[in-house]
Amino acid sequence: MITRELEANLLNALENMPVVALLGPRQVGKTTLALQMTQQHIEKEVIYLDLELDTDLNKLSDAESYLRRFENKLLIIDEVQRKPDLFRILRGLVDIRKRAGEKSAQFLLLGSASRDLLQQSSETLAGRIRYLELSPFSALEIHDMNPLNFSAEKLWFRGGFPDSFLAVNENESWEWRNDFISTYVERDIPLMGPQIPATRMKRFWTMLAHYHGQQVNLSEIGKGLDISHTTVKSYLDTLTDFYMVRQIQPWAGNTKKRLVKSPKIYIRDTGLLHKLLNISDYDSLLGNPIVGASWEGFVVENIIRHLSNKWQYSYYRNSSQAEIDLVLEGPDKQIWAIEVKRSSAPTLTKGFFSACEDIKATHKFVVYAGSEQFPMSDGVEAIGVVGMINYIKSFN
């Protein structure tokens, strides 16, 4: 069992909030983590419902009557996005049980759609719920499992979904990722997203993979799919809501420079990225033009998922092509400029230093493929991905 970093936050939420929502993509380990944590640390009796099963879904046909039967028990409701109207009922039940003196968790909701998507069709539980996101395995989780033999290459190539990363061989990992993508476009996205033909969504997802680490040209993609710019945007937002894509907005601070205003797009799991681009082995990845952008996405995703809500992230690029891959703005007016390089001997361009001056960076880093940390010129610190994560966590 690989220890998940979210365990402490999940346990704290269960002890202090009446409703906890554990969200993240399918097959990322939400159910495993929820059952493990509640069985080991929760004194209440635990009731588990999986809304993928018709028998459990039917139990909630009169949800209020059914849920009222379980006073002083913890109900885990899996795939909650299948019944978004449940939020309205939970709000009333939580308030009743709160007046009766219950303070710890009453409901643990597991969902495969984003908080924003769930709340589009449900009443808010503001003040009664804490949202946590479980992502695929991070570099730090894999490192901590076996620090002496840690190598980021396997995680980078296969991605962090447990069944892909832990597959017995490369072929099984490849087949799992193929099945995962097919299931998402054929079943999961149509369940809550727009009714998009599966072949079109898969083609869109593949086209999007070619823009990984870039500003996406929605009009160009629209022409290729014979759909409007607006429809392409809705497809992009759908993949974002299902944790498949991350959109990073441009830096919005004060500068006289003319800035790029479009978001950068990343396929969040690099294993899925490589499957979409048909890169079937590690040597092929190293020889592919996408290698730099793929590594950048791997590092950027690992950094972002470890930021607390005290931090904001963006990227910087101006009309002169001066660019910073990731800008972090945190407490005490800290502004971190982070550049990502695949090389084990990284070098930086004048554009990076110019951009650092524009944003008034207080810290400058280059995250590279090695593991040692050492200073470079002009106040830049070279650091590995695990070192960068640990450094961020010390400031959260």
Image: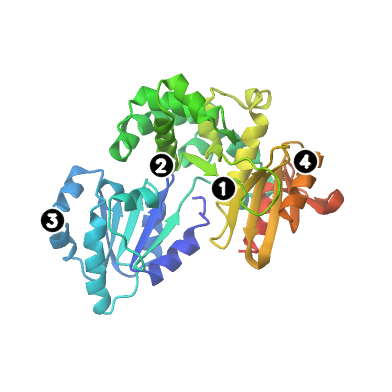
Question: Residue 263 in the image: x percent, y percent?
Answer: 55, 41
Image quadrant occupied by the C terminus = bottom right
At 40% from the left edge and 70% from the top edge, which residue is drawn? 15
- Type of amino acid under label 1: Ser
Label at residue 351: 4
Residue that numbered label 2 is attached to: 242
Disc 2 and disc 4: Cα gap in Å? 35 Å
Q: Mark 3 or mark 1, which is nearer the start of the sequence?
A: 3
Q: Mark 1 or mark 4, which is nearer the start of the sequence?
A: 1
Disc 3 and disc 2: Cα gap in Å? 28 Å
Asked whether residue 341 appears in the rendered view, the answer is yes
Residue that numbered label 1 is attached to: 138
Residue that numbered label 3 is attached to: 62
1 and 3 marks in contact (CB < 8 Å): no
- Type of amino acid under label 2: Phe
Question: Residue 135 in the image: x percent, y percent?
Answer: 49, 48
Question: Residue 190 in the image: x percent, y percent?
Answer: 30, 34
Disc 1 and disc 3: Cα gap in Å? 40 Å
Quarter holding residue 181: top left
